[in-house]
Image (spheres, coloured by chain):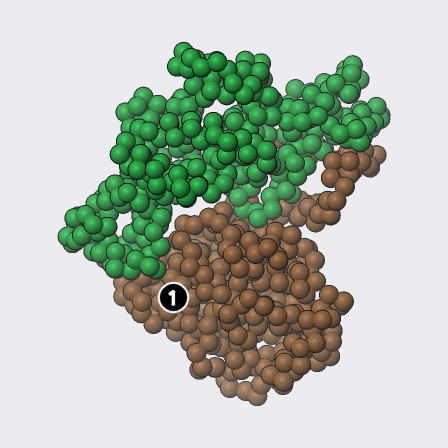
Chain colours: A brown, B green
Amino acid sequence: MQPSQPVPSFNRRRFLEFGATAGALALARPAWAMVEEQKTRRVILIAFAGGVRTRETFGTPENVPNLQRLADEGVYYPKMRTANRGHFGAALSIFTGVGQQRGIRENGRGPEPTLFEYLRKDAGLSAGDVWITTSGGPQQVNYSHGTHTDYGPKYAANTLDGDGIFNREFKSVLTSLGKPREMPEAEKGLLEKIREAMDPDSDDAENTARVEEYILAELTRGTSDVRGANAGDGKALRVARNLIALFKPKLTAVVLQNADTAHGSYNGYVEVIRRNDAAIGEIVETVTGDPDLAESTAIFVLPEFGRDRDLNSRRGLDHGDGSDDLNFVGGLAWGPDFARGRVVQDEVRTIDVMPTICELFGTRAKRAKGKRLAKLG
Amino acid sequence: MTLLPKRLQQTEAPPARALGLGVLRTLYMDLLGRPPFSAEIQAWRGRGRREWLDSVLGSFEFWEHWLGEQLYFFFLIDNFRPTSEALGNLSRKLDLGQLSVRDAVHRIGLSSSFELRNPGADTFVTVAMEQFCGLRVEKNQRELEIGKSLYDGKPGLFLGRHGSSQSDVVHIAVSDKRFARSFVAREYERLVHQAVPKKALAGWARSLQREPGEYLKLVRAWVLSEDYDGRLQRRVAQSGRLFIRTLFVDLTDALPTPEEAEPLRKALDGLSDSAPLRSILVRLLLDSGAADLPKREEIRDPSLWVGSHYQRLLGREPRKSELDACVATLAHPEGRPETVLYALLTSAEYHRY
């Protein structure tokens, strides 16, 4: 990694000044507009989850050439302390900025507001601006919002589980039902009148229609045919890439999961890491290939936790030994306002990422326990 | 399918709490995971809740639904869905009284699907403690470590009982009194849609721990309770699985096949707000012709037609503004019965029951 001079556009003083005024004005206009120098207007947050050790990522750069490139061009944190050792709670901690103790198979919303809720309510982002794509089925859609009474579903992210929706079986059932009939404008008008009579206060029709249209289009784009060791993750990353290219959302989050195959197969685990790195590379290409995105997008990548130090009896890797391999992960931040080629040896936490992103959008995660990532700008 | 009251003779009490269409619909959805078929509406409307419970509780369909809910709770779905005959037969054995609910959960815990879903000592024992006994491993680290030793074949005292194998971990966990407590709390919440009353929980858990066959009596008492009357007054969100089954029954008077239901359920579970995908499914099903709907001009009394669909789908009469909008649609050359049903089936109200 080549050390270089940090770009002075995102220093601590500016951050503090920014944070102090942003809260009051955030709803009036996009907060970044108040800081002339700040270029970041979009964020991609990838939870490289499923339990991924640094040894197989930045410790073996040939496995992750794309992540390594981002780290070389951005800020790398080799010592990020993780929040929990169950996938669900640990990933939820990333999105809430609070260490969450949750059951491994718990299928419920967390009590703390998520990053998405803060950005939608406090930074004024619209539903169409905040997305999360996932790989782990029904449990992971719980990341989209929590149960806190000040926030909640009204401020949720649009959530798509790549493998859940874009798979051959689902496509096949839809195909068997035929194509939806094009509704004439007059009929649409009649439909709207009934809907208005039933629910005059409803205001999500536009976003619902937009997501509906996107799903139908995505089903024709080949995502359903993604195969291989990282099929679920591959779909989540591909859906995210397409969303970024089509809608340029302000925040796109991705949660991966397939690396957990490590319990039974070390080689399979490494293969998932390599494939996911390649798919992340495609997202980076999409960003860097679009001048508007390239100069306005920040990317954060971090696992939710690592894995055990030693192989288990099946020549796999579990996650329960309490070792540093499990408790610390390597994460990175890349973007137009961040330092380049910086390695921050200070210990930071996975829960620090979320408040950092909130600050980028000019708001503060009031209940988060994490702090802004150190030495970012 | 529970068309007729096969266990009517079990209750001699006079019919009480006559079943209106809305209540009947909710009962079916809570206990069987689907709304009533047309023939069942004809058979049961106006009769008593006790009588209905006699017919449904402990039926094969009741246990099939119960098993589906348990497998979902343990996330034994999609790639982890059990395919073995042994688990497939659980509902039959429960129906025949050859197994109790605890036996059934025990067998789920011993299945290869459960092991595949929860690979490795740490995950397996953590899930056994959390999902069977409702324990937080963060507060029970010592038990977790002992359980992991058992999993690896070493003898130890796990949750107060001796064991030395992976199967002992499951056996000990489901035999523990905390299993009964956790199971009762979970089931009460699933059926009554509110947290279990703390005062009653201890007694119910003791009863189930002593005699697992008491489960059906508990369910019966819950559904006849004032708390359940309260539940009937408030709508709760439909799960993806319930929505699929409900939509098919409402439009085609038949359940979807498993080959249809599972991919659709999986897809709905993939969205935090599944309204857009539900809307797609409603459109497709309506446009596919699977629903036997009249043409606009064949509807002799539009108000009656609209009213009957509000009753059946939403369990209530339409308000005047709703009726006017629907009738106007049916009077318009571009309006269709499908347009009205599309509005009803994609309304937020339909997605709650």
Give the quadrant of residue A261: bottom left
Residue name at image x 43 percent, y 37 percent: B188
Q: Give the left or right position of residue A347, taking residue A355 as reference.
A: left
Q: Residue furthest left?
A: B155
| Tally of marks | 1
Q: Position of residue B73 (x, y in %)?
A: 42, 42
Residue labelled with disc 1: A306
Depicted B189 relative to depicted B317: above or below: below
Q: Secondary structure at mark 1?
A: loop
Which residue occupies the foreground of this view, B190 or A171?
B190
What amino acid does circle 1 point to? Gly
Q: Position of residue B79 (x, y in %)?
A: 41, 43
Which residue occupies the foreground of this view, A212 or B229?
B229
* Quadrant holding the C terminus of chain A: bottom right
Residue name at image x 60 percent, y 43 percent: B274
Residue name at image x 51 percent, y 56 percent: A111
